[in-house]
Each structure stands twice: as C-alpha cells, then as structure tokens.
Image (cartoon, rainbow, N blue to C red):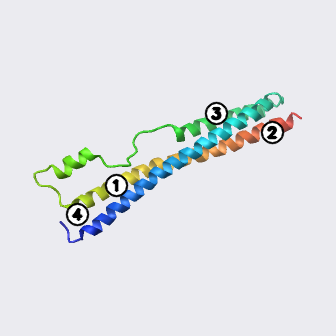
C-alpha cells in the first residue's frame, strides 16, 4: 500500500462517483429534450405539412418531408435505449474481487481501484454522451430546415 492516506483515495472515489452520477442526469436531460423536440416536430409536420401538400410547391414539400425523415432518424438515435453505459459498480464483482479473496485488499487499494474504474466508465460514457449530443444537434437542425421548407412551400403557393 502507498503512503497516501485512505481519505485521499476516498475523495478520488467520491469524485468519480459524483461525475458518473452527473452523467446519468445529463443522459436523462438530453433524452427529455429530444422528446420535446419530437413533439414540436410532429406538430409542425402535422400542421405545416398538411398545408404544404395543398400549396403546389412540390420541391419544397419533398425537401420538408426529407428533413422530417432525417429529423425523425436523428431523434430516434437520441431516444433509443442503448447498451454499454456504465453508471454503477457490479456488486457481485466487487464482493468476489475485493472481499472474498484469500488476501483481501486494503481499504485504500479498494478506493483507488474503484476510483480508477469509475474514471474508465466515465470516459466510455462520455464518448457515448458526445454522440448523443451530436445526434441531438442534427435533429434540431433538421427540424429547422423542415419547418423552413414547409413555410417556403406555403408562401410560394399563395
């Protein structure tokens, strides 16, 4: 065991735990925002799309529909449940790996190892979270272009 006090390792562990907990909250928030975006997009498509169909501007209508499809796909990439997230420690692995050994780990070593594991999990989650943000941005942009295309179709038809 190193000369570093147990409390120092516990602080590192606690910070890792806090960071991973914040990621859980961030994932929930971005999915919630994507759900709101889908509601707005569906309402806009239902209202503007219906009017754009009767406008006679076929090009703008098809661009709007294409943007809606792209928007729906991007939104689903955010909302669809995916595996591979790591937000908590495996208790069975913890008990078997740390406690039920012929030479159990010291508490400081447990904090160090678990803190390092949380950092690894945070980094893996951060990559997936970055992808979610990108898809959310794409969905937002596609929605803006969809609404713009439908508005062009409406204005051109008048």
Q: Would you name the residue on which mark 4 appears?
A: 108
- State the mark number for residue 152: 2
Label 3 vs label 1: CA separation? 38 Å
Quadrant location, the C terminus? top right
Residue shown at 62%/43% (left/top)?
36
Marker count (numbered): 4
Label 4 vs label 3: CA separation? 53 Å
What is the secondary structure assignment of the residue under circle 3?
helix
**Residue 147 picture quarter:** top right
Residue shown at 65%/39% (left/top)?
39
Q: Nearer the viewer, residue 28 or 3?
A: 28
Q: Would you name the residue on which mark 1 appears?
A: 118
The earlier-in-sequence mark between 3 and 1 is 3
The percent position of residue 51, horizontal first and vertical second, equals 80, 31
The earlier-in-sequence mark between 4 and 2 is 4
Label 1 vs label 4: CA separation? 15 Å
| Other-residue count near label 4 (Cα within 10 Å), few / some / many at <14 / 14–19 / ≥20 | some
Q: Would you name the residue on which mark 3 appears?
A: 69
Q: Is residue 127 left or right of residue 114?
A: right
Residue shown at 61%/35% (left/top)?
72
Q: Residue furthest right?
A: 158
The percent position of residue 126, horizontal first and vertical second, equals 44, 52
Label 2 vs label 3: CA separation? 18 Å
Q: Is residue 68 left or right of residue 73?
A: right
The percent position of residue 9, horizontal first and vertical second, equals 28, 65
């Amino acid at each position: 065991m190193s000369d570093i006090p147990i409390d120092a390792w516990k602080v590192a562990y606690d910070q890792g735990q806090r960071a991973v907990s914040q990621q859980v909250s961030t994932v929930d928030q971005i999915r919630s925002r994507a759900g709101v975006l889908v509601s707005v997009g569906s309402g806009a498509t239902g209202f503007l799309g219906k009017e754009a169909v009767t406008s006679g501007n076929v090009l703008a209508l098809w661009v709007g529909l294409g943007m809606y499809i792209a928007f729906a796909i991007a939104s689903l990439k955010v909302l669809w449940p995916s595996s591979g997230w790591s937000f908590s420690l495996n208790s069975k692995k913890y008990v078997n790996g740390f406690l039920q050994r012929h030479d159990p780990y010291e508490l400081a070593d447990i904090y160090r190892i678990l803190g390092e594991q949380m950092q690894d999990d945070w980094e893996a989650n951060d990559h997936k979270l970055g992808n979610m943000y990108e898809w959310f941005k794409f969905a937002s942009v596609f929605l803006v272009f969809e609404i713009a295309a439908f508005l062009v179709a409406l204005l051109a038809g008048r």
